[in-house]
Image: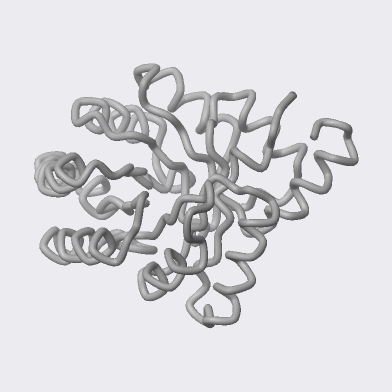
Amino acid sequence: MMEINRYIDHTVLKPTTTLEDIKQLCMQCVEYDFAAACVPPLYVKTTKQFLGATNTKVATVVGFPFGYSAIEAKVAETVLAIVDGADELDLVINISAIKNNDWEYLEKEIANIMYIIREQKKVIKIIIESGILLEEEIVKCCQLYSKYGVDFMKTSTGYAEKGATVEAVKLMRANLPANIQIKASGGIRTFAFAKELIAAGATRIGASASINIVKESREAGVQ
């Protein structure tokens, strides 16, 4: 039986996120046993305290949402998030570098960050913003990040016009080694869509409509 809750990173990343929002998110994570709580960097320490020794991991974002901050800034964000207690880091790569065809820059970026991730034994999810990339750019991303052995490739921030698609997940799955997982996020509000993305190869779902997804799965008799 599919336990949809264990696929979900229950997420709140809106710029107006309050401490109250975080408390509510954490209570829901405990109640529904979600895989991770994905929160703004400001709230990593608090989320860690709220979740305590539960099964839910603490995830946060780096270079969010546009990815064009300097490598040094992303390195600093990564270090601070780990110091505050993050287990998983969702990193937005430099999309401008992709559009400039500057793969050397992207390689330098990931090399600097992967060193810290591996040293600290954390999980990294690489956000490529698939909805605004060409197919060949997605394939090139898969090749580059495979080389560095990232944990997950992630479709979207949720801030681009186009979020997760079944096609993008299938394309990523076809071009990634089996040990690299896929997180689908961006516009996932129903169990039916989440199920399609999982069937296409996603092993994690990023959503703010997580409770609705779980309730729909129960109604469908899946959980």
- Above or below for 51 versus 191: below
Q: Nearer the viewer, residue 143 or 113?
A: 113
Which quarter of the figure is the C terminus placed in? top right
Q: Nearer the viewer, residue 138 or 47?
A: 47
Residue depicted at x 62% and y 32%: 197
Q: Note whether residue 170 is visible.
A: yes
Residue depicted at x 56% and y 29%: 167
Q: Nearer the viewer, residue 93 or 181?
A: 181
In this image, 159 relative to 179: left or right? right
Residue 130 location, x and y as percent?
44, 42
In this image, 55 relative to 222: left or right? left
Residue 67 location, x and y as percent?
30, 59
Residue 87 location, x and y as percent?
36, 51
In this image, 26 relative to 211: left or right? left
In this image, 49 relative to 21: left or right? left
Residue depicted at x 42% and y 69%: 40
Residue 112 location, x and y as percent?
10, 48
**Could you say which quadrant of the image residue 174 lies in?**
top left
Looking at the picture, the colour scheme in use is: one colour
**Could you say which quadrant of the image residue 60 lies in?**
bottom left
Q: How many marks?
A: 0
Which quarter of the figure is the N terminus placed in? top right
- Above or below for 120 versus 72: above
Residue depicted at x 88% and y 32%: 221
Q: Note whether residue 163 is visible.
A: no
**Could you say which quadrant of the image residue 43 lies in?**
bottom left
